[in-house]
Image (cartoon, rainbow, N blue to C red):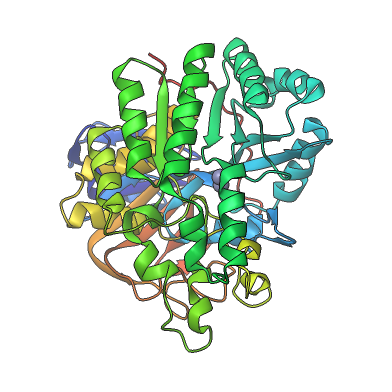
Amino acid sequence: MTILIKGGTVVSSTGRTVADVLVDGESVVAVLAPGSTLLGHDLAASVETVIDATGKYVIPGGIDAHTHMQLPFGGTEASDTFETGTIAAAWGGTTSIIDFAVQKAGERVEDGLAAWHDKARGNCAVDYGFHQIIGGVDEQSLKAMETLVDEGITSYKMFMAYPGVFYATDDQILRAMQKARELGLMTMMHAENGPVIDVLAEQLYNAGKTTPYFHGIARAWQMEEEATHRAIMLAHLTDAPLYVVHVSAKQAVEQLAAARDRGQNVFGETCPQYLYLSLEEQLGATGDPTWGDFEGAKWVCSTPLRSRAEGHQDAMWQGLRTNDLQMVSTDHCPFCMKDQKELGRGDFRAIPNGIGSIEHRMDLLYQGVVTGQISLERWVELTSTTPARMFGLYGKKGVIAPGADADIVVYDPAGHTSIGVGKTHHMAMDHSAWEGYEIDGHVDVVISRGSVLVSDGAFHGRAGHGQYLKRGLTQYLV
Ligand SMILES: [Zn+2]
Ligand SMILES: [Zn+2]
């Protein structure tokens, strides 16, 4: 299949230019000046499909480097399967995801990884890779880390939160980081002081403070700052690169900035929910008559939504501008209110943690361009180019250039997107965390390895199109 994407503004992380993009098979083969006759006088007549992108942006497909399809959590399972979640991703202009294979204490890493391959294989509509969660650091799992790079898994995640589930102690983190340094693996960290948070949560519960709002109070910013700092110090001690996931506290960004200023290989991601949503407005919401003071459960995630009065959201935008935060992923981990979030009615501690955003990341970040928070080029960098470089996909992904996979989105800045159930909403959820959001801009065409997945408001892809991405090492170390 040959495709010519004609007349659009091709945007990269470093600039923009009006150009024609020629796709042959699964790859980009040429980026041509408009009207170029280098490949013939009427290229449009010689290709099978012509896409007119005049007045639109042509960008590399989005890469969401933090998703949890059908993750078992809190006695239930994330409601998007690899099929429904990746179809929603495609609708929103995301053509690659990196999900997390899970190993827990007492389990073998190899078994966890095999189980996640079984869940994803043949079911994804877009390409997918894995990070490895090491939820139980012991002799066996440390040994198993040695095989990860050969499996195309060059990053693993540990948790300083969730005692009894995924929690790693400082001595375990030290050992894993030493191993990661030796192997070249990127250490990803959920940086919150879990044991302290659990005590605060119990005290709040015992005091009758049981609604979703108190999820945000229990998970105090001090415990994100403290854990972020501790992770940075352990990384410094072991000379291991560190990537802090879902940063939401402005004080955590300050810790990252200070470490980066010292020359440390420390990186941070934030998520759309920490840019837009807040403790006061969402976790404290009571406006939905079906749910009353339990409505905030829709937005229970960890790290939690933070106080707008304290300025965390503005600090996240600033971190993205100053490059103290390098990426925006979703931490997509959807749960329905009915039968899932409901498990925590009367006890916020039992609400499954997670928000679904995979479909809206590109649109939501584009609003930052519209409002002047970030540049058009930075939008592409945050959502595609940096994820590709950070996690060993660059060249094939994250760029529109000859030889790259033809993962391309045609984005219409003059279009409009209404988010919400019954409107734009393809995730397997009975509500939207983004209900009522009106987006300036629209994902018009989505191409994955030369196949048109979305065009003319219709989905043309299929489960099984997506291939496993064996990833290389990060390109970001200084
Ligand atoms: Zn996490
Ligand atoms: Zn996560």
Asked whether residue 164 appears in the rendered view, the answer is yes
Image quarter of the C terminus? top left
Which of these two is toward me, 84 or 38? 84
Residue at image coords 63%, 27%: 152
Instruction: Reply above or below: 129 against 372.
Output: above
Please provide percent x and percent y for residue 331: 51, 50
Q: How many marks?
A: 0
Residue 40: name its quadrant: top left
Residue 282: name its quadrant: bottom left
Instruction: Reply above or below: 70 against 31.
Output: below
Which of these two is toward me, 233 or 320? 233
Please provide percent x and percent y for residue 57: 25, 51
Asked whether residue 392 appears in the rendered view, the answer is no
Residue at image coords 23%, 42%: 318
Direction from residue 340 to residue 238 in the image, left or right: left
Direction from residue 24 to residue 400 in the image, left or right: left
Please provide percent x and percent y for residue 387: 43, 35
Residue at image coords 29%, 20%: 261
Direction from residue 271 to residue 78 in the image, left or right: right
Please provide percent x and percent y for residue 232: 46, 24
